[in-house]
Each structure stands twice: as structure tokens, then as C-alpha cells.
Image: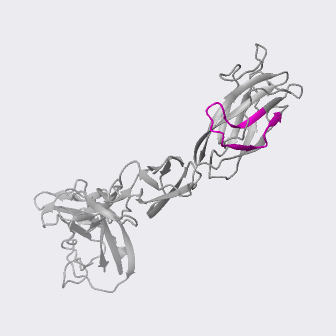
Amino acid sequence: MIITSVRRTGLPALVTLAVLGALGAPGLAGVANASTPSVTVALIGNFTTTPGIHTTIQVTVPSGPSGCPISPANELLLEVGDAFGFGGDGTVNNSPPYLTFGACDTPQQIQLWDSVVGQHLVAAFGALPGGVDLGVIGTATLTVVNTLDATPPMVTLTPDRGPDAGGYYSHPVTVRATANEPATCDPDLTYGGPDSRFVQLKMDCTDTAGNVGHGTVDLQYDATGPVLNPSVSPNPVLLAGTATANAGATDALSGVGTQNCAAVSSSSVGARTVQCSATDMAGNTTTGTASYAVVYRWDGFQQPVNDTAHQVGLNASIFKAGSTVPVKLQLKDANGNVVQAATAPQWLAPQKGSATTAAVDEAVYTDAASVGSSFTYDPSTRTYQFNWNTSKAMAGFWWKISVKLDDGTTQTVAIGFK
């Protein structure tokens, strides 16, 4: 093989170089024609070194779009070293002096070094059999420094926004790493839980000298709303009475910020609900309902039935078996005002109790028995009444009588028969 116009001294150190051979390169003599193949040379290594320190470069001839341009019968002779005569300063050394390639994609190694601090031009000179001089088919710059960079970059991690509320994030937050010098940093990191008062995210950046810097950012994350235990007090609430609702909120992480409930309504009897909500310091809101009942004020059954649970100083009523027992009652609101129910009170089947030998202490009534199970309302007295027609077989026992009210409650009293 004949080499013409090839560099005469050693080569500079390279990091990465991939160049396409140009036929008849400027400043080089050689034989080139339309049949001369186009050759690509790839050099991979570290282009930065210190004075006199060897750096190893890997050299490869990759296959081209039309296949491999070289073969054992058409070998490439390659010198990678100082670009002397083509802008080089003649100070870069190389070992071995030449590389021979008879196949593509097979890497070989050379070493480059220089004792002069500064930047030095390196060239790749190629030649083929038959005196075909490819000339300079690539250049690169070797940098020689007094001291290699051994300082890792300073890394800063920055969230894409400030905390949502109270110093806490309650929705996913994305963090980006940046360095104080040219560097390759980890991809953006998105954090969306788990909840914690102390979250530390870590990311790295690598500078051009391979030094790795580490960065951290601390944040608080709470995406869980408060826990509610809503209640109404007192419960049940008297008709037209007053009561308050409490959300009963707790929050294990950021703490409860605000909590409130709507006003408790007692304008009508029956089962009711009231809406409550709470928001924690991180801005998470939880809603819920408290159930309660609105009932009549109950002062007991009226005469002639003695309701000893509500009327102090009276004995339980003993009626004559077989007579009629007029069972009377009034419904009231919290202020003692007599009211009429939307649905009439309902008479429930009496229940037989224990035996009694007590004597009759109530008058004997012969009123006609009520038909059905509904109490009758008397607007003049604002009283409900149900006439219970008893039998003589009921004598000698206590009986529990009951009334079902449309507020959902059942009121009872015990009376005896003789």
C-alpha cells in the first residue's frame, strides 16, 4: 500500500468524531476518481486530558448505506494524529502510528497525548491500495488542561408551581433539575403521593467531565380531605326548637382549616338531614350530612289516663274491665304551643302485662268505641281521642297502650283493669 500526503507526527486526543471521507480533500495530493469509495470514520473517546496523559480513542469504520466500502482486498490505511501541515501544531502524539481496516464495524484503539496546554487540531488521514489518497477524512480538537474538572455541578430542583395551600401540595407537582454549568440532568419528576409532611425528591445532573451533582427539594403533600363525623345536638330536636350541627372534622396531616354546617331546620316533624363540610389546610374539602329527627314535645297522655311518667303524684289508672277507656292526647311544639299533626296518631294493639289486684280508681265510661285505628281530632279542645272498648276478660292485669305519632315516635302508658 502506498500512502501519500499523510501526517508525519503523532495525533491529538479525541472524544467523538464521525466524518465522511471527501474525495480530493483540499491540500492533499492523491488519486481519486468516480470509483473511489466514500468512507466514514467514527472515533469515540475523551477529547480532554492533562499534559502528557494518554487518552484512549476507539476507531471504527461503520458500514454505509450501500454496505461496507472496504474489504481485505481493499484495506483502509488510517492515521489519526496531529494535523500537521493542515492547521495542526505538530505536538500531538499517537500510538500506534497507523491502523489498518479490512472490515467495517470492527473497532480498534489508539492512544493520543500532548504535553502542551491548549487546544490542538487532530486529523484522520486515509489511503486505499493503488495509491488512492483519501486525504483528511475528519478532524477534531484535543483540549489539554492543567487540571481536569473534578467538581460536580451544583444542582437546583425547582417545582413547576408553589404549594396549593398552607405550604402543602394537594395535586401532582412536577420538579425540574438545573445545573450551574453545562450538564445533562435527570428528566422532570412528577410527584403525586403518597401524602406526607416530609417529602424529599432527589435528582442528578452530569457535567461534560462526567462529574455527577446531586440536588434535593423538600415539600409537603396532602391530597386527602378531612374526615367528617357530623352530628346534631340535641337530637331529636323538638318541633320549632333550636339545635346546632357540628361537622366533627379531623385531619391527620395538614390539619382542619375550616368546618361548618347549614342551619338545623325544625319547622316540621320527621327525619331530616343537614349538610356539613370541612376544608383542611392543604385546600382539600370533604362534605357530608348529619341525620336528625324533629319530634313533638310530649307531656304525656291526658285524663282520664294517669301518665305517671309525666304527671307527678298520681297513681297508675285502674279502669273497670268491659268499660270504654277514652285515651286523649295533645301534641305540642318546643314552646308548649298545641299543634295539629299532618297525619293523625295511630292506635296500636294493646299488650297484656303482669297481674294486678289493685281496685278501680277511675270513673266508668260508656262512650261508643272508635272505629279503625286513627285518633279523632277535636278542634275545640285541640285534643286527639281514641275510645278503647275493653272486655271483662282483661280484668286483673296490666295493659300497655301505645300510640304511633307521625314524628316517628311511639308513646306508651300502662293501665290496669279490675
Residue 283 at x, y percent in the picture: 33, 55
Residue at figure coordinates x 36%, y 75% from the top left:
394
| Quarter of the N terminus within the rendering | top right
- Indicate whether residue 81 is drawn in magenta: yes
Tell me the quarter of the picture where residue 400 sits.
bottom left
Q: Is residue 385 above or below residue 305?
A: above
Q: Is residue 40 visible?
A: yes
Q: Name the residue furthest top.
A: 34
Q: In this view, does 380 lie above or below 352?
A: above
User: Is residue 182 toward the left or the right of residue 406 in the image?
Assistant: right
Residue at figure coordinates x 59%, y 52% from the top left:
210
| Quarter of the C terminus within the rendering | bottom left
Residue at figure coordinates x 72%, y 37% from the top left:
80
Residue 347 at x, y percent in the picture: 31, 62
Give 10 or 213, whichever is nearer the viewer: 10
Give 301 or 299, whichever is nearer the viewer: 299
Give 286 or 298, whichever is nearer the viewer: 286
Start-end of magenta stretch: 78-100
